[in-house]
Image (spheres, grey):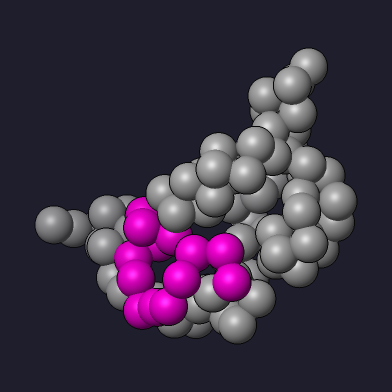
Amino acid sequence: MAGANNALQKPVEVSPELEEVVGKGPMTRAQVTSKVWEYIKKHDLQVAEDKRMIEADEKLGAVIGKDRISMFKMTAAVSKHLT
C-alpha cells in the first residue's frame, strides 16, 4: 500500500482523554475513527433533528473541546489526540 492509505494503517498512540472513548492504543487512525463512531452511536450522541451534529457527553467533550460539533470537524479535533 502506498500514499494516503499508509497514514490510516499506521498505528498511533491515543491521548488519555481519547482512550476514555476508544480504549487503549496503539491502533490505526481508521480504528480510532470507527471506535469514535461506535461510541457516538452507543451513547446516542447524534442530534436527532440534525444527524450531522454530535452532542458530546463528558468523555467525548474532553476530546473535542466543546459540547457540540459537526461530524465534519470532529476528525480534526480527534486528530489532536493522536501521536
Quick check: can you spot residue 72? no
Question: Quarter-wise, where is residue 30 in the image?
Answer: bottom left
Quadrant of the image containing the N terminus: bottom left
Region rendered in magenta: 20-33
Question: Quarter-wise, where is residue 70 in the image?
Answer: top right
Q: Residue furthest left?
A: 1
Q: In percent of the image, x 36 and y 79: which residue is there?
A: 26
Q: Is residue 77 above or below residue 70?
A: below
Q: In percent of the image, x 44 and y 60: which residue is there?
A: 32
Q: In percent of the image, x 57 and y 64: which residue is there?
A: 21
Q: Residue furthest right?
A: 67
Q: Is residue 31 above or below residue 16?
A: above
Q: Is residue 61 magenta?
A: no
In the image, residue 17 lies at what x, y percent?
65, 76
In the image, residue 55 lies at what x, y percent?
78, 42
Question: Quarter-wise, where is residue 4 in the image?
Answer: bottom left
In the image, residue 25 lies at what x, y percent?
40, 78
